[in-house]
Amino acid sequence: MKKIPSLGDLLPDFIAKTGINRTRKTDDLAEKWRAVAGRFAEVTAYSALRRGVLEITVTDTIYIQELMFEKADLLAKLRAAYPDAKFKDVRFRVGEVGEDG
């Protein structure tokens, strides 16, 4: 007789196939970015994390210039909030930022 798999056996495959874990990490990173961004939270938004490089969308190039001055501090705060993430860099690009940042 074939053994019926337990929920514990099925759950990892389900999470991997649905991408739930990636979505949760994305939401968590977006929330952490808003906390770290401070006065820039309303004009920026988390976009992606690729190979240790955090990509942030910014509403205007003027804000990108200001963010570049604070880049080292922002990166230090992100590393403190996520010690295991090993952030290498933060990159900013102009784009549309939603109402919730």
Image: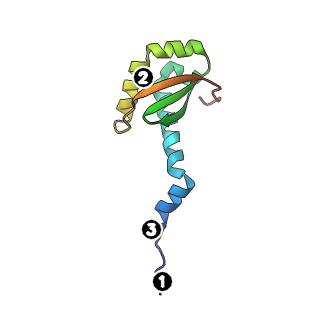
Under mark 1, the amino acid is Lys
Quick one: which residue is furthest to the bottom in this view? 1
Answer above or below: position of 29 versus 97: below
Label 1 vs 2, first from the N-terminus = 1
Residue annotated with mark 2: 74
x and y, in percent, of residue 3 in the image: 46, 81
Under mark 3, the amino acid is Asp
Quick one: which residue is furthest to the front in this view? 51
Label 3 vs 1, first from the N-terminus = 1
Q: Determine the residue positioned at 54% across, 16% down.
A: 64
Label 2 vs 3, first from the N-terminus = 3
Answer above or below: position of 11 versus 27: below
- Please give the count of numbered marks on the rendered protein: 3
Mark 1 near mark 2, Cβ–Cβ under 8 Å?
no
Under mark 2, the amino acid is Leu
Give the alpha-carbon distance from disc 1 to disc 2, as whole Å: 54 Å
- Mark number for residue 39? none
Residue annotated with mark 3: 9
Classify the position of the C terminus by image quarter. Answer: top right
Q: Determine the residue positioned at 42% across, 23% down.
A: 74
Residue annotated with mark 1: 2
Q: Determine the residue positioned at 48% across, 83% down.
A: 2
**The image quarter in which residue 57 lies:** top right
Q: Secondary structure at mark 3?
A: helix
Give the alpha-carbon distance from disc 3 to disc 1, as whole Å: 15 Å
Q: Viewed as shown, does residue 98 lie left or right of 77?
A: right
**The image quarter in which residue 81 lies:** top left
Residue count near mark 1 (Cα–Cα under 10 Å), binned few <14, some 14–19, many ≥20: few
For the residues carrying marks 1 and 2, which lies nearer the camera in this image?
A: 1
